[in-house]
Structures are given as structure tokens and as C-alpha cells.
């Protein structure tokens, strides 16, 4: 299968990326080259092989099902709101401000 | 007195003892490093920001403890640099990206807290590939890092600044991160020691995520003994990282004293095939001879799925990245594009202006692999092959105690040499990604030089949570060269 410019546009939309006209053909070319390399995986028969999300499951190290290993669910101090808001591009001190979401 | 210390070769133990015995103050040692950075880092570009104020507050605390005869930590007064993907309250954290320009995180990464609790003086933030995506440090929005051993060559990536700063004498040790080889490969290129701890061994809290099932934090040092000291400080469970492990942490420094005689060393034939530079092959074979001379036995092992590691990695890592990097949208921190009338336009413009080409390429690839109709063909398939790759290692480690192989197919390449071809750049990770996917520990240890004087690293891989054996083998290789 081959990735077209239209595919790149669709995926860019899904990823909230805006690509310039110059970036588009280069991205399509690169994605095709990389996916061509990735196609090697189809040589392998993986019927019945479990999917692995991270290594803990292979070693039986995932947290116990009922949360026995988790820390106690109690209220405790978190980050200082003022320190967090100081880093925001636009804020009223309590909330993050963004451009209008819904037109009325 | 301070002028008796050679900043290029200074070890953690030497620095700590000099501070402890009052031969140099922690503040003077930090200042010497800052002076060296000021005069020489212009041509290397390893530091993105210096945290002078915080460093001197900490140095004075250490100096006061020395005067008072108080308890001193294992890193008391030792100047250390931190890769810019880790947060340090008050210092910038750009992750090498424009999208985080000006961002000052309001909290410390757990590893930063642990280093300071051990007495370390944190000098500043180190350059890296944008969001740790790269094998050459040429993807930093703040300019490439140059290899201190050959300025026209790359230091490796993504932790290029972390490796270069240790090699150039700009800190005694540093922190890097490794997702597919980003500690081991730059360590090999710059001629320093780099350790990839087992997944879960070191907390990721405060690490700006690239691929969460693969990302790990580890040290760069000038010796295996220093790496053992650093790992001892960094390792352990953290309630702020649910994937960190409660598996017990050994006294790595004490473990190093154990002889390596009788250890079984595996050599995977798949790591010595076509494309391996002959000088690197010869250096690795010499290391194997050294291990044999030290009493180890050498065994052939097979890791039959090795050739599938790169395609597996580039599906899984990019899929996780496309998810992790969705948080950079101009709302809560960092860059926000001007003149956006709608929220959707603001997201897109911010991300378009803030991300570099390689980051966009990986987000697109990962989004494609996760999108409807392709999920099973790419993402699920890669997760299944990840199981096969991990089983390869579990099988090999039933027969041997450690695996020895190359870190990279070639020594450090020239700046600009591979930037046009992403697949060529990705193949740079051919010997490092399998260990990343399997979650085992690994390290790069200097084992020689090419005729042109470029450093060569040898990779030692260990069982899950068996950093002790890995470090012992690394130390034996190191000792044979002295």
C-alpha cells in the first residue's frame, strides 16, 4: 500500500497538524519509505502471539488487579495553582483562556 | 588547590573526596565548571540553559555540611548536567523544541530530587534532539551538538548534549534518557559510559514523555564505577510513577568488587552481520578476549527476531509519541500561535510552528499506524513482534548471564551526513532498539578507538533488574584496557 498526499492530509488532520504545500510531498515520500521498511513485519506469522504493551506484563510485574499495590487514595497537596498558571500563554489566574470554541 | 583537579578526567569519587576533605569547595568546583563551559561550550553547544543560582544554593549547602562535619551524600558537591527533557523547577525545559520555548516547569523530576538529596550540584540543562527523537542531535531546535572528540562529527542522539558535556569536561556526570538507544549510542560516539537501566528501575516522573512504554532515564559517566554510584542514587520505586518497580535495588558499588570469573557471556551472531564496521568488530572481539582472560566463558546465542526490531520500534514509539505529544496545543504551557480565531486553528498553527520536521514525521507515522483500518496491520502486529523479541532475550538469558555486542554499526558520522534519509538515520539504532523493546538493562562502555581516533563502545546487556552483573562485566572490559 502506498501513502498518497490525500492520506497525509487526512492523517495530519487527525493529528492536529497543519502542513505547508512544500512539506506535503516530502512527508508522503518519507512515510512511504518508512512504511516500506515496516512491511517486513508481515514476513512473521504472529498468529496466537500475545500483544505486549510494556515489559511489566511479561515479567508479571503489573499492579495487582484490585489496586493493592497502589498508594492510598487520600487528598494531599498538589502543584501550586499560581505557579502553574504563570506558565500559561493566556489565563485569568484561575482558568486557561482559549479562542472561542462555539459560535453563537 | 582547585587547580590540581583535571576537569576532563575527574571522577565522582575524586570530586566528592576533594569536597569532603576540604581541598576544594563545592562552590569553587561548580564555578570552575561554569568557567570552562563559558570558554569552550561555544563550539560544542551542549548546554541550553545554566541553573547557576540553584547550583550555588546547593553548593553552599554542601560546603556548610562539610564545615559542620555533617553527613554527606554519595554525590556531595559533584557537578552534574541534566538532559533538557527532564524538569527542574525554575529552569527552562524545552525538550529541544520551539513549542516549549520559555516554559519553566513548576516541579522537579524525581531523579532531580534524588540527585540533589545525594548532594549533587546541578549545573544546567543539556541539549538534545527535539522530544528525544533523533540519533545525531541534529533535530534540536537550538542547533546541533558537536562531538568533543571530532567537532565535525555528531555526538549521537538523542542525549547528545549529555554525552558531549561529560566527554568535554563540562560536568562530572549527566542524566540522559534512552527510548531506542539515546543513551548508549551517544555514549559510544563520545567515548563515555552510558547506562540504560531496566524499564521500571528509575522513575520517569518529570520526564517529558516520548514513548512511555520505552522511555528510561539513566546516567552518563567517565567510568563504570561512577555509573554504579549514579545508578544507586537514581534507582528505586516512586509513588509518582506507577510503572516504577519495587524490585530490590542492589548496592551496585559493592557488587563491582565481585570477580567476573565464571560468568557466562553470550555473543549474538545477529549483531555481527553485514554493515558492522570492521574496526568496531575488532574492538568488540578484543573485549570478548579480555573477558575470557578474566575467567568468563563465551557462548554463541541467537536472537532470531533481531532484524525486526527497527520496524517494530518505529511503529510502537511513533504511535505512543502521537498520543503523548497531543498535549502540546498552546493551551497550558509553552508556545501559542498568534492570530487564531478558533480553538482548532490555534491547535494546528501552534503545532505547525512549534514542532520540527522529524517530530511531525513521527507524529504522522504514529497517527497513521493507529488510525482506523491500520491499527491491526501495524500497531497490534508490532506489539506481537515485541513479544517475540522479548522472548528471544528471555531464552538467551536462560543460558548466559550477560550479552556482549556492538552499540552502533559505525563510529560517529559527520554532521549532515544522514539528515536527508530518515530510514538511514533510523538504521543507526539497529543494535540498540531490541533491548529497549524488551525492557532489559544495557550499557555502553568505551572499548577502543578507530585508526582515525574516534571512540568505539561495546554494549553489555543484562537480565531484567540485573544491573549488577551488567556493571561487573562492563567494569571488567574497562579494567582490561588500563
Image (cartoon, rainbow, N blue to C red):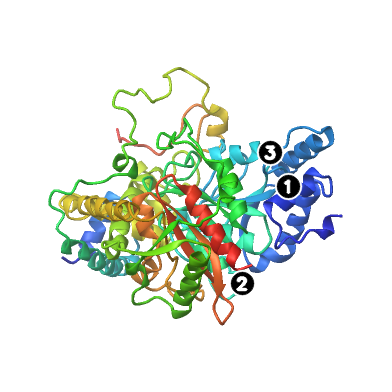
Q: Is residue A95 left or right of residue B434?
A: right
Q: Is residue B5 left or right of residue A13?
A: right
Q: Chain of mark 2?
A: B
Mark 3 near mark 1, Cβ–Cβ under 8 Å? no
Q: Residue B107: x and y, percent?
A: 56, 36
Q: Is residue B109 visible?
A: no
Residue behind mark 2: B149
Q: Chain of mark 3?
A: B
Q: How many marks?
A: 3
Residue behind mark 3: B73
Residue behind mark 1: B16
- Look at 28% across and 26% down and name the residue there: A65
Q: Earlier in the sequence, mark 2 or mark 1?
A: 1
Q: Earlier in the sequence, mark 3 or mark 1?
A: 1
Q: Nearer the viewer, mark 3 or mark 2?
A: 3
Q: Quadrant of the N terminus of chain B?
A: bottom right
The residue nearer to you, when weighing B385 against B92, is: B385
Q: Point out the residue furthest to the bottom here.
A: B451
Q: Earlier in the sequence, mark 3 or mark 2?
A: 3
The residue nearer to you, when weighing B337 against B458, is: B458
The residue nearer to you, when weighing B444 against A9, is: B444
Dot 1 falls on a residue whose secondary structure is: helix
Q: Residue B297: x and y, percent?
A: 43, 62
Above/below status of B31 relative to B476: above
Amino acid at each position: 500500500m502506498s501513502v498518497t498526499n490525500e492520506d497525509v492530509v487526512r492523517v495530519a488532520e487527525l493529528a492536529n497538524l497543519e502542513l505547508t504545500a512544500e512539506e506535503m510531498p516530502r512527508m508522503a515520500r518519507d512515510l512511504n519509505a518508512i512504511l516500506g521498511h515496516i512491511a517486513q513485519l508481515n514476513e512473521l506469522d504472529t498468529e496466537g502471539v500475545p500483544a505486549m504493551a510494556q515489559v511489566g506484563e511479561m515479567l508479571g510485574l503489573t499492579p495487582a488487579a484490585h489496586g493493592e499495590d497502589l498508594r492510598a487514595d487520600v487528598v494531599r497537596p498538589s502543584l501550586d495553582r499560581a505557579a502553574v498558571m504563570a506558565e500559561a500563554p493566556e489565563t485569568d489566574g484561575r482558568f486557561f483562556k482559549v479562542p472561542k470554541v462555539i459560535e453563537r | 588547590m582547585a587547580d590540581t583537579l583535571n576537569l576532563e578526567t575527574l571522577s565522582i569519587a575524586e570530586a566528592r573526596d576533594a569536597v569532603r576533605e576540604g581541598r576544594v569547595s563545592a562552590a569553587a568546583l561548580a564555578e570552575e565548571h561554569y568557567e570552562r563551559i563559558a570558554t569552550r561550550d561555544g563550539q560544542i553547544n551542549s548546554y541550553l540553559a545554566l541553573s547557576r543560582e540553584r547550583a550555588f544554593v546547593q553548593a553552599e549547602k554542601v560546603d556548610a555540611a562539610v564545615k559542620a562535619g555533617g553527613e554527606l551524600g554519595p554525590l556531595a558537591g559533584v557537578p552534574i548536567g541534566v538532559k533538557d527533557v527532564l524538569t527542574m523547577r525554575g529552569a527552562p525545559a524545552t525538550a529541544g523544541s520551539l513549542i516549549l520555548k520559555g516554559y519553566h516547569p513548576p516541579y522537579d523530576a524525581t531523579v532531580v530530587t534524588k540527585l540533589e538529596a545525594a548532594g549533587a550540584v546541578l549545573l544546567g540543562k543539556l541539549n538534545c534532539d527535539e522530544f528525544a527523537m533523533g540519533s545525531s542531535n541534529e533535530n534540536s531546535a537550538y542547533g546541533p551538538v558537536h562531538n568533543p572528540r571530532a567537532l565535525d562529527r555528531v555526538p549521537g542522539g538523542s542525549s547528545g548534549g549529555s554525552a558531549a558535556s561529560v566527554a568535554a569536561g563540562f560536568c562530572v556526570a549527566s542524566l540522559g534518557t534512552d527510548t531506542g538507544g539515546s543513551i548508549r549510542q551517544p555514549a559510544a560516539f563520545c567515548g563515555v559510559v552510558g547506562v540504560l537501566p531496566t524499564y521500571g528501575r528509575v522513575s520517569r516522573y518529570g520526564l517529558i514523555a516520548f514513548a512511555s512504554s520505552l522511555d528510561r532515564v539513566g546516567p552518563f559517566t567517565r567510568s563504570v564505577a561512577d555509573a554504579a554510584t549514579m545508578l544507586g542514587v537514581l534507582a528505586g520505586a516512586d509513588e509518582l510513577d506507577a510503572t516504577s518497580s519495587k524490585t530490590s535495588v542492589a548496592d551496585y558499588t559493592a557488587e563491582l568488587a565481585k570477580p567476573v570469573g565464571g560468568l557466562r557471556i553470550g555473543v549474538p551472531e545477529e549483531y555481527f552481520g553485514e554493515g558492522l564496521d570492521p574496526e568496531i568488530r575488532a574492538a568488540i572481539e578484543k573485549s570478548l578476549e579480555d573477558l575470557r582472560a578474566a575467567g568468563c566463558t563465551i557462548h554463541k546465542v541467537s536472537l532470531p527476531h533481531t532484524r525486526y526490531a527497527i520496524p517494530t520500534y518505529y511503529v510502537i514509539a511513533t504511535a505512543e509519541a502521537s498520543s503523548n505529544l497531543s498535549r502540546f496545543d498552546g493551551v497550558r504551557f509553552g508556545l501559542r500561535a498568534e492570530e487564531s480565531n478558533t480553538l482548532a486553528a490555534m491547535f494546528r498553527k501552534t503545532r505547525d510552528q512549534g514542532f520540527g520536521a522529524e517530530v511531525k514525521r513521527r507524529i504522522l507515522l504514529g497517527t497513521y499506524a493507529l488510525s482506523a483500518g491500520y491499527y491491526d496491520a501495524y500497531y497490534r502486529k508490532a506489539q506481537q513482534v515485541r513479544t517475540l523479541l522479548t522472548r528471544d532475550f528471555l531464552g538467551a538469558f536462560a543460558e548466559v548471564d550477560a550479552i556482549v555486542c556492538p552499540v552502533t554499526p559505525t563510529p560517529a558520522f559527520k554532521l549532515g551526513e544522514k539528515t536527508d534519509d530518515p530510514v538511514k538515520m533510523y538504521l543507526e539504532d539497529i543494535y540498540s532498539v531490541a533491548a529497549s523493546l524488551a525492557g532489559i538493562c544495557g550499557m555502553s562502555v568505551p572499548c577502543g578507538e578507530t585508526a582515525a581516533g574516534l571512540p568505539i563502545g561495546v554494549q553489555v546487556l543484562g537480565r531484567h533488574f540485573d544491573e549488577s552483573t551488567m556493571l561487573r562485566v562492563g567494569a571488567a572490559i574497562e579494567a582490561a584496557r588500563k
